[in-house]
Amino acid sequence: MKIIYQIAIIFSICWVSQVVEALLPFAFPASVIGMILLFLLLATGVLRMEHIREKSDFLLSNMAFFFIPAGVSVMNYFDVLKSSLIPLVLICLVTTVITFAATAYSIKLTVYLMNRRKRNHG
């Protein structure tokens, strides 16, 4: 029963994000809306991590499976993408470096703030 409850929570968040996307007067991905909604629910304490831990761990451990349709689509449209191959590879390389840098600085900031909080409270 616990797994069904966790699946219901995750699918409910996905459904609400789809509804919000349909109601918005501009294009915005439902997946991003869902992540923002999940973050807000977790940050405010309305939803606790224990409510979705097992199912989210399962989904994260099997994440590569969910990239198969996107990979197949890229292969199906390779003839279309071939004309823009160099700009696409360049964009992928640049955004990868930016993502690595943003992640590294986020972790550095988080460690700094945690150490500062520990010194002030401990």
Image (tube, grey):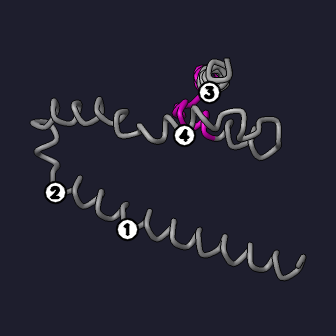
Which marked residue is nearer to the observer: mark 1 or mark 2?
1
Marks 2 and 3, the one that precedes in the sequence: 3
Name the residue at 24% across, 61% down: 90
Which marked residue is nearer to the observer: mark 4 or mark 3?
4
Q: Which corner quadrant holds the C terminus?
A: bottom right
Q: Is residue 61 magenta?
A: no
How far apart marks 2 and 3 lie (CA) works out to 38 Å
Give the labeled residue for mark 4: 57
Marks 4 and 1, the one that precedes in the sequence: 4
The amino acid marked with disc number 3 is Ile
Q: Are marks 1 and 2 in contact (CB under 8 Å)?
A: no
How far apart marks 4 and 1 lie (CA) works out to 27 Å
| Residue found farthest to the front | 1
Give the labeled residue for mark 3: 10
Marks 4 and 3, the one that precedes in the sequence: 3
Name the residue at 11% across, 44% down: 82
Q: Can I make out residue 20 in this image? A: no
Mark linked to residue 86 = 2
Q: Which corner quadrant holds the N terminus?
A: top right
Give the labeled residue for mark 1: 97
Looking at the image, residue 48 lies above or below residue 4: below
Magenta stretch in the rendered image = 18-35
Q: Is residue 18 left or right of residue 84?
A: right
Q: Is residue 46 left or right of residue 30?
A: right
Q: Quadrant of residue 87?
A: bottom left
Which marked residue is nearer to the observer: mark 2 or mark 3?
3
**Residue 13: x, y in percent?**
65, 26
